[in-house]
Image (cartoon, rainbow, N blue to C red):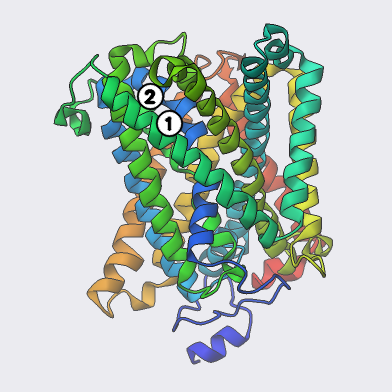
Amino acid sequence: MTDAAARERPPRSGETTAGPAGNGGVRAKGLGRGSVGLLGSAVIGVSTVAPVYCLTSTLGPTAGEVGVHMPAVFLAGFLPMLLVAFAYRELNRAVPDCGTSFTWSVRAFGPRVGWMCGWGLVVATIIVLSNLAGVATSFLYLLLGELTGSDAVAALDGDRAVHVVTCLALIAAATAVSYRGMTATKGVQYALVALQLAVLAVFVAMALARGHAMDFSWDWLNPFAVPSFASFTAGLSLSIFMFWGWDACLTVNEETAGSDRTPGRAALLAMAVLVGSYLLTAVAAQRYAGTDLGDPRTSDNVFAALAEPVMGRALGALLFVAVLASAAASLQTTFLPVARTVLAMSTYGALPRSFAAVHPRFRSPGRATVAAGAATGVFYAVMSFLSTHVLVDTIYALGLMICFYYAITAFACAWFFRGELRRSARDALFKGALPVLGGLLLTAVFGKTLYDMWNPAYGTGSSVFGVGSVFVIGVGLLVLGGVLMEIMRRRSPAFFRSGR
């Protein structure tokens, strides 16, 4: 059977449909075509990662784990992300579908693996959305307290009812912007991303100019100089989390001009901006603060501790604004991948068809977006009032979900294109060797993280029958996905027979 003929019918489980770049058998979903260009797509990728928020919450813990070798660990975390980005680029050229990991893994490995891969993306996104809303709320009251000079205003964040209500309001606002489609999303993101990167650049310049705690050394960039393997893997797990979200570029591929090539280029551009920002900030902060950067008293919010000493009171307040903008921007764009994955899963019959509805005016997956917003709000409210320890441990389990669906996607690339790997050296490298290497690295991190999570000391230190709560939550969420998949298999047997 020819490639063209194969793409005209649903592929059977385990059968590939690789062929010349084209629409790859993508089913039209009613999204607004051509509403995003290369720059807009890259901005969405950077925004979803939330670089300023990631830096303020991760610089300290990473420095605490690996000391002065933090820049090296950032580079090491960038490597598997880059390798997986090559897999996304190649798969998107063949099948530019907004379901991304779900659609591609279905094509490569069949409906069951594909469904679980899609579930991994959805549940990871719901968890991080709730966390972003919480961070945005905290920085909102911190900024208001700074501007008004009132400790009472800043302390409002400690009132659980006020905190949760504010979170729900922010989630509702982000849902509304995403609901209005890519045009509204793009305009908001240009302003928020430009603001946070500009303020970050000022911080880096001033920290380098004023920093004398430690002289720069090339040894900072040597991952082999990290004192222990345990410290290295702990830092690597944090680093991988810092890069997560760049694949949002790909989930808007059906709405991007040049859908087969532009999203892949945007992802690589976003990755370059991120790794450059992280390395410069790590070097600057380390040069200014030295070993104090890993101080556990300030490690959970480094910029709150360094803003005024580095930038002064007036400019330091801008750093709070940048963190708030970063969290708010990411909160809004992170709705894009989850809504479009749910849209694709519904379109192909893997989820109820009602979620496949696209707003006739805004050309966005309206029902899927609202459902994602509602799920995020309910999850955060319930977890906040039930147990803050459970909420924090759920966030710790996020890394497991990230490695899970990224690794499956990387392996799916090599299997999808297995018939083309001998065609040229380029195909062998970018469709086979590099994605497989990225998948193996992420699988190793997944396994090591799973092992560490068993220990009750991981996360908040709580346990269930002697097993770490983070392990129970992480594995429990994957098991829940398996249960939901079986329910859908009974409701939608056609998808699980054909995978389309």
Instruction: State left or right for residue 39 relative to residue 223.
Output: right
Quadrant that contains the C terminus: bottom right
The 10 Å Cα crowd at callout 2, few under 14, some 14 to 19, many 20 or more, is many
Task: Judge by depth and name the residue closer to the eye, 297 or 472.
Answer: 297
Q: Is residue 15 left or right of residue 434?
A: right
Residue contact between numbered discs 2 and 1, judged by CB atoms under 8 Å? yes
Other-residue count near label 1 (Cα within 10 Å), few / some / many at <14 / 14–19 / ≥20 = many
Which one is in front, 306 or 403? 306
SS of the residue under disc 2? helix
Q: What residue type is labelled 1?
A: Leu
x and y percentages locating residue 402 in the rendered image: 51, 43
166 and 312: which is toward the camera: 312
Which residue is label 1 attached to?
Answer: 238
| Amino acid at the residue labelled 2 | Thr
The CA distance from mark 2 to mark 1 is: 7 Å
Residue 349 is tagged as: none
Question: What residue do we see at 35% from left, 67% from top?
Answer: 431
Where is mark 2, residue-wise? 62
**253 versus 437 height, above or below:** below
Q: How many labels does the image show?
A: 2
In terms of image quadrants, where is residue 131?
Answer: top right
Q: Position of residue 126 (x, y in %)?
A: 67, 41
Spot occupied by residue 430 in the image (x, y as percentages of width and height): 32, 66
- Residue 491, position as x, y percentages in the image: 82, 61
Relative height, residue 299 to residue 72 (above, below): above
The quarter holding residue 296 reads top left
Let me know if residue 401 appears in the view: yes
Residue at x 57% of width, y 44% of height:
192
Q: In this view, does 443 lie to the left or right of 367?
A: left
Height in image: 357 above or below 200? below
